[in-house]
């Protein structure tokens, strides 16, 4: 089951992190920032700016590129798409020659024990199938981690089928939440101190002192 209303690509990562977080953002329109969110936003603001970028000769870079896939009802914005000269590539409107399409997603922090975060990879895969749909190509996909200042190529040529199945599964589950208008409950034992929506998700009750409670009982 695929959503009729386009799903924002960025929301897939919210769902993978926590279905309840996704529902609070999607259904309640809740939003809050913490240090991690601000850090990521500042990185993307810098990427999406018009600051000059050093590129190999002939490579064309476009920032904040809107992509979509009507069949999967997906839409979103790629941080950067590079069009790399390639005689076996595809033609790009308003550009001379043929090009290979390369997606670059920017993230602040690289994982310690693996080349990339799985949630990052799914987000970029969603961008890829949108880009492939628009330009009728097999685009390359990379994540640039600011903490290491390195690009990591994602293995979609080898594991594309697995990523596609995972993406369809997440879209189906997200659709059920959107259609039901029900926010999933907190999972037992869930610890979410790093989530920017922690206070909205786990509202604290007002503090009641023992002395005040006893005084109220005696005065009744």
Image (spheres, helix red, strand yellow):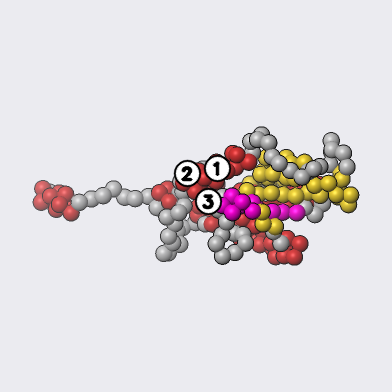
Residue 127 on image: x %, y %? 70, 50
Residue at 42% over, 48% down: 200
Quarter of the N terminus within the rendering:
bottom right
The first of marks 3 and 2 along the sequence is 3
Q: Are marks 2 and 1 in contact (CB under 8 Å)?
A: yes
Q: Label 2's element? A: loop
Q: Nearer the observer, disc 3 or disc 2?
A: 2
Label placed on residue 33: 2
Residue 168 seen by the camera: no
Label 1 to label 3: alpha-carbon separation: 21 Å
Q: Are marks 1 and 3 in contact (CB under 8 Å)?
A: no
Q: Label 1's element? A: helix
- Left or right: residue 117 versus residue 212 is right
Residue at 59% over, 59% down: 117
Residue 203 on image: x %, y %? 37, 50
The residue nearer to you, when weighing 208 against 113, is 113
For the magenta stretch, what is the residue range?
Answer: 140-150
Residue 61 seen by the camera: yes
Label placed on residue 41: 1
Residue 35 on image: x %, y %? 46, 46
Residue at 26% over, 49% down: 207
Q: Nearer the observer, disc 1 or disc 3?
A: 1
- Left or right: residue 18 versus residue 204 is right
Task: Return the residue at label 3.
Answer: 23
Among the 4 quarters of the image, the one containing residue 115: bottom right
Q: In the image, is residue 106 above or below residue 173?
A: above
Residue at 45% over, 49% down: 197
Q: What secondary structure prevails in the magenta region? A: strand
- Left or right: residue 77 versus residue 190 is right
Label 2 to label 1: alpha-carbon separation: 10 Å
Residue 206 on image: x %, y %? 28, 48
């Amino acid at each position: 089951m695929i959503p009729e209303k386009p799903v924002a690509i960025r929301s897939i990562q919210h769902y993978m992190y926590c279905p309840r977080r996704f529902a609070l953002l999607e259904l309640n329109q809740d939003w809050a920032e913490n240090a991690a969110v601000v850090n990521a936003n500042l990185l993307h603001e810098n990427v999406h700016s018009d600051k000059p970028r050093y590129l190999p000769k002939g490579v064309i870079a476009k920032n904040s590129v809107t992509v979509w896939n009507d069949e999967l009802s997906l839409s979103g914005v790629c941080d950067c798409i590079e069009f790399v000269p390639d005689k076996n590539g595809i033609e790009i409107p308003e550009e001379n020659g043929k090009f290979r399409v390369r997606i670059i997603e920017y993230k602040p922090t690289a994982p310690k024990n693996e080349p990339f975060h799985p949630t990052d990879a799914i987000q970029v895969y969603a961008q890829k199938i949108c880009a492939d749909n628009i330009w009728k190509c097999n685009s390359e996909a990379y994540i640039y981690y600011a903490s290491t200042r390195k690009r990591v190529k994602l293995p979609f040529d080898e594991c594309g089928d697995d990523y596609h199945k995972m993406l369809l599964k997440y879209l189906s589950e997200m659709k059920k939440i959107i259609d039901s208008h029900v926010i999933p409950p907190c999972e037992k034992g869930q610890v979410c101190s790093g989530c920017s929506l922690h206070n909205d998700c786990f509202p604290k009750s007002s503090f009641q002192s023992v002395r005040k409670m006893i005084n109220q009982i005696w005065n009744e």
